[in-house]
Structures are given as C-alpha cells and as structure tokens.
C-alpha cells in the first residue's frame, strides 16, 4: 500500500536532523523541464502561470538558483520543505526516526518539477503546478511530460508492498498525472466531506487539512493495510459506508 499526496505552492527547504538524503528519482527529467523554464523570460513566466509581475520575478530567481544534482547546503528534505494546508496537519516535530523512515517507504509526493518525490529526497524551492500548460519537448503539457515516468515509478514501488494499492490523497489536479490504465495496482481515493443542515458537500479548505491529518495518522500508526483505513476518526470524521465504494472511501464530519 503506497499513498500519494500533492505538493504545495508554499515551501521553505528544511533538512530533518539525523537523517540521510538522496537525489529525486526522476532528476534527469527535472533537468529537461528546468531547462525549458529557464528559457522563458519573466513576462513569459507571468503569463504561463497567471501570477503577478513580482511573483514571476521571485519564481524566476528561485529557478535560476537551482543546482543539479542537489546538495544538502542548498536543499531540504521533501517532507519537511512543503507547507500549506495539507502539510501543516503533519506533526513532523513529533515524528521519530522510525516514523520518518516509514513515511519514506510508504508515501510519495506528486510534484510539477520533480514528478514524484520520496519524503527524504532533496529538493530546492520552485513554483510549478502540475496543471501548468507548459510544452516540454514533444509533450504539450506537464501531465503528458510526467505521466509515463510517474506511473512506471509507482508500479515498480508498489510491487514490493504487501498490497498493490495506491491510496490517493492527492488533489484531483495532481492525481490526473497517474495513468490509471497503465497502473498495475488498484487506485483507492480518499475523500472528505462536511455535513451541515442535512447537506453533505466538499469544503476545499477542510478537505485539504483532513488529507494532511489522514496521512499523518497513517504514518504515526504505521498503517499499511487498506482494511485498517476505515478506522480513521480524527476531527469527528467517520467512514460513510453508503457514500463509499470499492474505489473511494468517503469520510464525513459534522460542521460546527
């Protein structure tokens, strides 16, 4: 059982003390992608990403500071470097070394620049969402650029696990990069919803935080069997059997 999670736009590279690090597995493709980005001027970057002039300048500077391969003096561990709503719910400061090693073996982070990151991979600051319509070589957009490599890497990794299941805690935008037709495993999506006045709906901010809390729960409890997933009960969430299916587990909580 292998869990996938989306990367976040907000990040600050940090190293986890006392732990080894390695290069991202798909760094050769990252180099090709980075070369394409560096050929864009700031106006082109601003238009591509739909961001402000100031943010385009900051992003361009970040990308030009990236050095490959990474070194620990200018990079951080992937799991410790992303922030935002999802990652803020993961209590890294409380993790033991064993927790982090379990995460490294059972969690993968989907990334627009790196394709797929393991928690202890090195990374440097960047800004590139998976849904960006950037043409790279023969690929018309990032989904096409990354899909085969990401899917193949997931297949090879999950083949060594007790259950050949990908637990999808990624956003819809990022999960699209996985080619489910080529995937040699079952994809099980985890969804979180709110109930208020007898109406059940997805509230984006709560769903993001719940995904982070869910992954945190998986790590600290060493969950590696799908039969144990239904026990998740943080923040009042309970599995809604009537809303769930073989391909999706839906957890619902009552809004305050």
Image (spheres, rainbow, N blue to C red):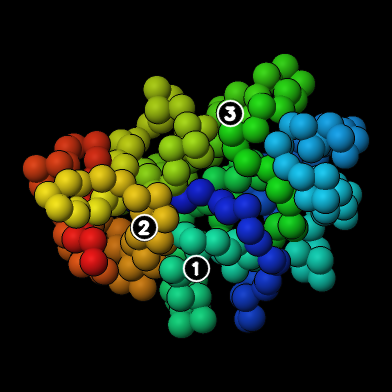
In the rendered image, the residue lying farthest to the left is: 242
Structural crowding at the residue carrying mark 1, measured as other residues with C-alpha within 10 Å and reported as few (<14), some (14–19) or many (≥20): some
Q: Could you give the CA–CA distance between mark 3 and mark 1, rounded to whole angstroms?
A: 26 Å
Q: Nearer the viewer, residue 195 or 29?
A: 195
Quarter of the picture containing the C terminus is: bottom left
**Quadrant of res 158:** top left
Look at mark 2 in the image and give the residue it sits on.
Answer: 206
Look at mark 3 in the image and give the residue it sits on.
Answer: 143
Q: State which tag comes first along the sequence, 3 or 1.
A: 1
Q: Secondary structure at mark 2?
A: helix
Where 20 falls versus 185 (above or below)? Answer: below
Mark 1 near mark 2, Cβ–Cβ under 8 Å?
Answer: no
Q: Position of residue 132 (x, y in %)?
A: 65, 33
Residue positioned 88% across, 39% down in the render: 42
Q: State which tag comes first along the sequence, 1 or 2.
A: 1
**Quadrant of res 216:** bottom left
Residue 212 left/right relative to 60: left
Q: Secondary structure at mark 1?
A: loop
Residue 104 left/right relative to 24: left
Q: Could you give the CA–CA distance between mark 1 and mark 2, rounded to whole angstroms?
A: 12 Å
Q: How many marks?
A: 3
Look at mark 1 in the image and give the residue it sits on.
Answer: 88
| 1 or 2: mark nearer the eye | 2
Residue positioned 31% across, 46% down in the render: 202
């Amino acid at each position: 059982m292998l869990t996938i999670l989306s990367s976040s736009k907000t990040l600050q590279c940090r190293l986890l003390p006392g732990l080894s690090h390695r290069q991202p597995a798909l760094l050769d493709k990252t180099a090709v992608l980075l070369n394409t980005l560096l050929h864009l001027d700031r106006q082109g970057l601003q238009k591509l990403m739909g961001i402000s002039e100031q943010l385009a300048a900051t992003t361009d500077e970040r990308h030009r500071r990236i050095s490959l391969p990474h070194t620990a003096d200018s990079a951080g561990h992937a799991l410790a470097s992303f922030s935002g709503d999802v990652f803020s719910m993961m209590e890294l400061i409380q993790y033991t070394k064993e927790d982090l090693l379990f995460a490294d073996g059972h969690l993968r982070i989907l990334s627009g620049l790196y394709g797929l990151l393991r928690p202890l991979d090195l990374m440097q600051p960047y800004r590139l969402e998976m849904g960006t319509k950037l043409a790279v070589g023969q690929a018309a957009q990032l989904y096409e650029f990354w899909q085969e490599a990401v899917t193949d890497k997931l297949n090879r990794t999950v083949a060594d696990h007790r259950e050949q299941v990908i637990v999808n805690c990624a956003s819809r935008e990022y999960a699209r990069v996985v080619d489910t037709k080529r995937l040699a495993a079952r994809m099980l999506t985890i969804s979180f919803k709110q109930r208020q006045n007898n109406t059940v709906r997805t509230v984006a901010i709560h769903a993001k935080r719940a995904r982070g809390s869910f992954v945190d729960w998986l790590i600290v409890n060493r969950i590696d069997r799908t039969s144990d997933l239904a026990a998740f009960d943080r923040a009042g969430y309970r599995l809604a059997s009537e809303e769930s299916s073989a391909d999706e587990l839906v957890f619902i909580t009552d809004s305050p």
